[in-house]
Image: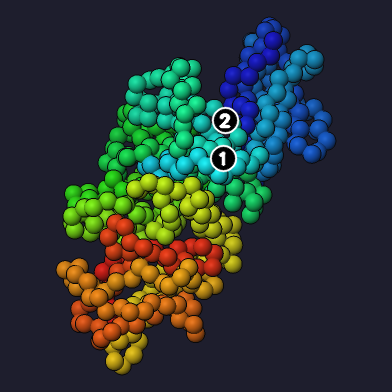
Amino acid sequence: MLRIEHGACDYQVFQRDERNEAVVNVSGVYHADTAGVVEAQIVKAGDLPRNWAEAGKAEGGRWQASVRLQTGGPYTLRFRLQHQPDEVVEIKEVLVGDLWVLAGQSNMEGVGDLVDVEQPHPLVHSYTMAESWEMAREPLHWLCCSMDSVHNPNGIAPGDEQHAEWHRTRNKGAGLGLPFAKAMVEATGVPVGLVPCAHGGTSMSQWSPDLVHLGGGSLYGSMLRRVKAVGGKVKGLLWYQGESDANPNDAPLFAERFTRLVESVRADFGDPNLPFYTVQIGRFVVAMPEEGELAWNQVQDMQRRLAEEIPNTAVVASIDLELDDLIHIGTQGLKRLGRRLANIALRELFGRSDIQRGPRLLEARLDNAEGTRIRVRFADVNGSLTAPGRVSGFSIRTAQHHPYRIIYKMEVDKVSPTDVLLHLTEPCPQNAFLWYGFGTDPYCNLTDEADMAVPVFAAVPIER
């Protein structure tokens, strides 16, 4: 009897190489003593089956074969021994495309209501936390199914009754991964494989590469093991984390820890230019002391700045999106957020020069001789800036963060619609600073025509 043991399984997605191909190596066992040739047949959906062709050898009860696939699919791969042509094993729904890692904390894990979720797509598959491939569907993250103790410390097996109860009663778990992948497939035709690795409530310290020696006992070690399990190469990593570090103790260390994480991921994944796209943390509807609010803004501002300093990184904003609870982006907002990340990937990796990276602050400058109008300039805007209703989110503050309540009107400039004009009741004070999204629960509503939102920024000097 011919059996496959290693190399590929149903619904697996293989990372394409620079030639838009993937080499799939498969091995297994057979019950015979004779040596011989292994043949393979490749069947692509919608095409006529290829002829059987030599693909490997069988000897001593073991066999191995290798086939080369073009980007696309789904493929069915069939294998047989040349001297036993009637005994065939096959692997179905195989794709060749791009693999993306989903990592970070709860907003990446997905806590959106499981209502009107993104629907599956035949060219988007997921490597489940139970270590199997399947068509991607919400929710993607099932920590309780993980073999790694960092996600499943009680070691509850997937067949346990507790799992069945979780599956029957779960009502939260929508994320941004599936909307991102569908947007990519619909724009490029290239299949996508997702590798969920996120875990809610986790800090940069818990994601530290220094813990890799713990293997599945650490977040970083678990992520690295899962990447190796899907072939060791991925197209990029999507990262959404920072809420757990937005406090007075950890915020000052965020830039150093994040930079180290990016460097380590690129080294351990074997790609010094690996795309690393992040989400700026959004709102938190909770009362906290001023030092806590400032730490929240500090992390947001560092995320914005680091995306300009570290090559092959980018950040998208989430500050304008609705929540499903006090801190988690809602299901419909996560759909928008996934498409925002896809816009970045399409521009940076697929040459879509018609898509800009999204509004990026250039400067804030007094715009008239009286000092009663400020022009806020942005670059990388898709078309014009826009807002539902009146523009909101800007504030002018002292060096000690106290507000000057002097803005009576905020508007997109009709002549130069990538700029915002702030009209003041009196001349702007000396040593004043401009903020967008001050505090943990601001109302910010400024986007561009591609729905890329203006990110939070803190304490920007107002030029004269």
> Helix or strand or loop: what does disc 1 sit on?
strand
Asked if residue 417 can be seen in this view, the reply is yes
Left or right for 164, reference 200: right
* x and y, in percent, of residue 160 in the image: 45, 16
122 w.r.t. 160: above or below:
below
Residue at horizontal 70%, vertical 23%?
A: 90
Pointer 2 with pointer 1, Cβ within 8 A: yes
| Of residues 390 and 1, the one drawn nearer to the viewer in this rendering | 390
Residue at horizontal 45%, vertical 43%?
A: 112
- Disc 1 marks a residue whose amino acid type is Gly
| Of residues 309 and 375, the one drawn nearer to the viewer in this rendering | 375
Q: Which mark is residue 390?
A: none
- Disc 2 marks a residue whose amino acid type is Trp
- Identify the residue position indicated by label 1 in the image: 193
Residue at horizontal 53%, vertical 38%?
A: 138
> Helix or strand or loop: what does disc 2 sit on?
strand
Residue at horizontal 52%, vertical 42%?
A: 115
* x and y, in percent, of residue 294 in the image: 23, 59
Left or right for 8, reference 40: left
| Of residues 286 and 455, the one drawn nearer to the viewer in this rendering | 286
* x and y, in percent, of residue 300 in the image: 32, 58
Q: Residues within 10 Å of mark 1 (few under 14, many from 20)?
A: many
Asked if residue 271 can be seen in this view, the reply is no
79 w.r.t. 362: above or below:
above
- Identify the residue position indicated by label 2 in the image: 133
Q: Residues within 10 Å of mark 2 (few under 14, many from 20)?
A: many
Left or right for 276, reference 285: right
